[in-house]
Image (cartoon, rainbow, N blue to C red):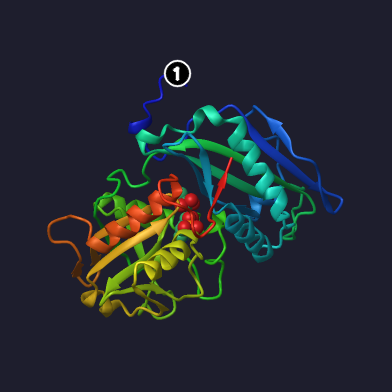
Amino acid sequence: MENIQWSDLSFGYIKTDYNVRCYYSNGKWGALETSSSELLNLHIAATCLHYGQEAFEGLKAFRGKDGKIRIFRMRENALRMQSSCRGILMAELPVEKFEEAVLQAVRMNERFVPPYESGASLYIRPLLIGTSAQVGVNASKEYLFVVFVTPVGPYFKEGFKTTPVGIFREYDRAAPHGTGTYKIGGNYAASLVAGEIAHEKGYSAVLYLDAREKKYIDECGPANFFGIKNNTYITPESTSILPSITNKSLIQLAEAIGLKVERRKIPLEELATLEEAGMCGTAAVISPIQRVDDVETGLSYVFSKDGKPGAICQKLYDKLRAIQYGNEPDTFGWTTEV
Ligand code: PLP
Ligand code: COI
């Protein structure tokens, strides 16, 4: 702990002091418990291990110039986790319990919230798993909710710099009526092979097309997609992408700075007309896209010739960060002071 180089942190895992746990059995959630162990004691037949009953969330706490710690939009994450639970038949955790556990995890690990100047933050990872022994394919009767935290730097090692992303048509992340809208482990397992290939070829992420027709932009492996043209913020409408809380926030910020907003299908060819493009998410924040390569067809769509982020990406990034770190008034009511 004593020698964490806050400014050099990547998006990794560092042990912190405590995690918070809550068990569900006999149809109800118990009291929050704290633990200093990084390990879980699991039944070998737990449904999370065999049938993927696992949902998670990702949110961040930021230390401001004023020393205060602010958590960004935690209620939205609580609601999305409930949606994920409905999606794979797990017991829903009450919003208040989620919020209480997150606050407790941040408070108990306060010394791991990176200093303001570092630009790093505390990543909060809630997860919910099915724990009862079940060899038939059925929902668990018991669940465990855990919140742990770890200090992180940028998800893409480049930080706020443009990077290239690739389209790999022989891989899908999620089906049109599958589980893409839920934040569950299976979706990420499904994205590992394509992600690995993309990294080997020098791309920071995979840009997925819609699985049915391969005609429209879906999202990136760990982040939503958005484009800018004609003073308009455009982001995909799709039944197979995660409803990103960062994207939802950027939509409001875009409107606040006078952009029009369109959430609609984005045909692949439309990339040629975009002035800027980016990935957005809790971990990714805004990661501006340098170019998209459609690897099989050999077509390239370039958004930044000089490698620099576009002006609107920069403006949205600055606005978002200013609210997260408490440098600008939180007129939207997005942050919770710890
Ligand atoms: N899309 C996927 C697949 C993600 O894993 C994430 C990360 O959470 C996002 C989008 C961005 O969502 P959010 O802004 O809520 O973090
Ligand atoms: C996040 O942005 O919080 C994510 O969960 C993305 C990735 C780390 C899975």
Relative to 100, say whether 269 is above or below.
below
Q: Residues within 10 Å of mark 1 (few under 14, many from 20)?
A: few
Name the residue beneath numbered marker 1: 2
Residue 100 left/right relative to 125: right
Taking the view exactly as shown, the residue that stands out farthest to the right is 26
Residue 29 left/right relative to 216: right
- Residue 67, how many percent across, how many down? 47, 34
- Residue 279, how many percent across, how many down? 35, 60
The image quadrant of residue 158 is: top left
Q: Please tell me which residue lies in front, 182 or 282.
A: 282
**Quadrant of the image for the C terminus?**
top right
- Residue 239, how many percent across, how many down? 51, 75
Residue 316 left/right relative to 145: left
Residue 70 appears in the picture as rendered: yes
- Residue 34, how many percent across, how many down? 70, 32
Tag 1: amino acid: Glu
Residue 12 appears in the picture as rendered: no
Q: Please tell me which residue lies in front, 240 or 297.
A: 240
